[in-house]
Image (cartoon, rainbow, N blue to C red):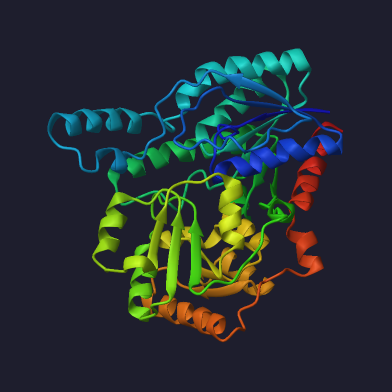
Amino acid sequence: MKLLLVTMYFPPAGGGGVQRPLKFATHLPAHGIETHVLAPDDPKWIHVDAELQLPTQAWIHRARYLGPRSRKHAEDLHGRRGLDRVTRQARSLSRRLLVPDENVGWNLTAIPAAVRIARAEGIDVVLTTSPPNSVHLVGAAVKRTTGARWVADLRDSVAAHPHRRVERTAVRAKEKISDQVARLVARQADAIVAASDAIADEARALHPQGVVAAILNGADFDDFAGLEYRRGDRFRITHTGSFFGKRDPRPFLQALADSGLEDVVARFVGDFRSADRDWAAQLDLGDRLELHPYVPRRRSLALQRDSDALLLLIPEAGGRGRGVLSGKVFEYLAAERPILAAVPPEGAAAELIEETGAGVVAAPDDVAALTSALRALHDAWAGGTLDGTPLSPADRERLGRAARVEELADLLRGLVS
């Protein structure tokens, strides 16, 4: 069978959203699925990872990107004054008015390209992966035009994303549009694939006409091959990934300040908001806080492996964060270093970390609990009893990426058999 995978995130773009579609495209051909990928030619992302390898057994197609540069609105305005600030505010507003999201302009080239590829290659199934939600309009168009089956892959919730600032009127209005996209997917997709059980349950609540399957993100243990942990003279706790939406480093930073531990260094690798940077400066953490810019994935994995502990942050977000089981959770599991999980205690991430024995859990906004967890990890390190957290053979097989790809391959074949 032949598959067309449509994604906004694909190398040379870097960042966490790249890994799921990249791993699917890399490993599906081994299951007898001829895989074609359609991605933007130049999406103008802030982050580029030239070290990421393109799949050697998949066909890569590009469609011209039409849309704004992917900058964070608040960062673009931070420190701006006068006419420069007004101009940038107007530019930001125009982006916010685009529905269902600012990347919808890419559909002007992506839809014709996808239809052309589907017809020329005899595509059996088109798989669209979000975010952004607008990419699913490509899948609907290909299905309607060519008769190919359509699978919608939801890496995040379409209608109830945990990082959306729903207290803002404009965000709530845009979320109503996202709800319409979710209903379009439910009505027309032949199958819906979700990256967590919570997202799958949300899709089932819309009574979709196709099957819904939870295919989680997987742990890529082989990606850490050759990377080592070396104990240093300070306790190093590392967070990799950018800050946006409701992801908040401040409770942990306050816990670090309250702990009184002078031989701890917290390393944040990735985009760190200017407002959070200014707030952290008031804590006078000195060399206990290191802020590093974005680094390529291989370097990020090396920093994870060479850490005494890893910091995972998932916001409560009014209950929306409880179902989040992001790719970062599985990446940290594969790093096999103890995790301080500042996540909803009753959520999916907490459950997985506790059942695998990979770390300790504290509510993301509970400074006292975070302080206690940090001290416990530090004390174990100081006493020489803080070991790595290798998963059992059964957990490695259950949580590894190979099992996820096999699940997807079985679903795809079932649609055309």
Q: Residue 206 is drawn in which quadrant?
A: top right
| Rendering coords of residue 7 (x, y %) | 60, 32
Q: Nearer the viewer, residue 247 or 182?
A: 247
Q: Residue 115 is drawn in which quadrant?
A: top right
Is 278 placed left or right of 241 in the picture? left
Question: Residue at the spot x=57%, y=50% of the render?
Answer: 299
Rendered-image quadrant of the N terminus: top right
Query: Going by the picture, which residue comes out furthest to the bottom?
Result: 383
Question: Residue at the spot x=38%, y=73% of the render?
Answer: 256
Is 131 placed left or right of 62 in the picture? left
Q: Nearer the viewer, residue 285 or 114?
A: 285
Q: Is residue 232 above or below residue 224?
A: below
Q: Nearer the viewer, residue 48 or 200?
A: 48
| Rendering coords of residue 236 (x, y %) | 50, 69
| Rendering coords of residue 183 (x, y %) | 54, 38
Q: Nearer the viewer, residue 111 or 380?
A: 380
| Rendering coords of residue 364 (x, y %) | 43, 68
Question: Residue at the spot x=61%, y=20% of the render?
Answer: 62
Rendered-image quadrant of the C terminus: top right
Is 46 placed left or right of 214 in the picture? left
Q: Is residue 241 above or below residue 170?
A: below
The answer to whether residue 122 of the structure is visible from this angle is yes
Question: Residue at the spot x=52%, y=35% of the render?
Answer: 48
Q: Is residue 62 above or below residue 381?
A: above
Query: Going by the picture, which residue comes out furthest to the front?
Result: 233
The answer to whether residue 326 of the structure is visible from this angle is no
